[in-house]
Amino acid sequence: MESIVNTIPGYRVYEYLLVLRPHEDLSGRIIKLKEEFAEKFRTGQATGGKPYLALASFNQLAMLEERIIHVLRKLSMGFPPFKVTLKDFGSFPAHTIYVNVTSKLPVQQLVKSVRTEAQRLMKMNEENKPYFIMEPHFNIARKLKPWQYEKGWLEYSQKHFTGHFIASGMQLLKRPAGEKKYQLAAGFSFENLPVSTKQGELF
């Protein structure tokens, strides 16, 4: 059934990811961490691709993309740039090791704003609800086997890492459902403008 749906224009289903991107220098350092972990603990995971801090993920029909972009653009225009600080490592037992984000509050505020403004548009149906990531982090390795997690966390819980970047905007990535590679759907700048979202005030 899904393949039929995916051949009708506008009814194609995409997987979307809303992210923050660090600057090139910090990206390079995170990629190096991922490569070192993959090599040392033989995860076989692809470490390519630019690192990102995920804010939300959802599946939706292509025909709703423009409306979602419009809402996210409006929201971004009213949001101020903010500093994202990274320090050391954390884990989701027993499968994921990540770089900690210590400046959680502005990221969480952004995620809450996105949820408030765009949740309804992001929800495709009861089976496909958007997922909002309230624990900001940069994955180093995920879907680990028990031994990889245990040995990896034993080492990385003692390791140190610091970094920061200014989040001056966010990106919406997309890929056809079931495919691996994301492409950029839209970019949004945080402009800290006095944007009114109340429809009634326009009149």
Image: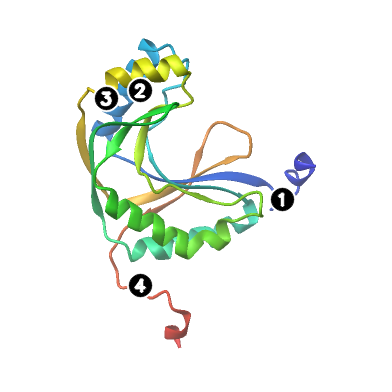
Q: Please state which of the two labelled residues, at mark 1 or mark 3, is closer to the viewer.
A: 3
Displayed quadrant of residue 24:
top left
From the viewer's perspective, is residue 13 above or below residue 151? below
Between 134 and 192, which is closer to the camera in this rendering?
Answer: 134
Residue kind at label 2, given as amino acid type: Lys
Residue at mark 4 to residue at mark 3: CA–CA distance: 43 Å
User: Which secondary structure, mark 2?
Assistant: helix
Residue 17 percent coordinates (x, y): 49, 44
- Nearer-N-terminus badge (4/2): 2
Residue kind at label 3, given as amino acid type: Ser
Residue at mark 2 to residue at mark 3: CA–CA distance: 15 Å
Residue 11 percent coordinates (x, y): 71, 51
Q: Circle 4: is it few (<14), some (14-19), or many (20+) Cα within 10 Å?
A: few
Q: Please state which of the two labelled residues, at mark 2 or mark 1, is closer to the viewer.
A: 2
Give the residue number, with chain letter if any, for mark 4.
Answer: 195
Quarter of the C terminus within the rendering: bottom left
Give the residue number, with chain letter if any, for mark 1.
Answer: 9
Q: Circle 1: is it few (<14), some (14-19), or many (20+) Cα within 10 Å?
A: few
Q: Please state which of the two labelled residues, at mark 2 or mark 3, is closer to the viewer.
A: 3
User: Which secondary structure, mark 3?
Assistant: loop
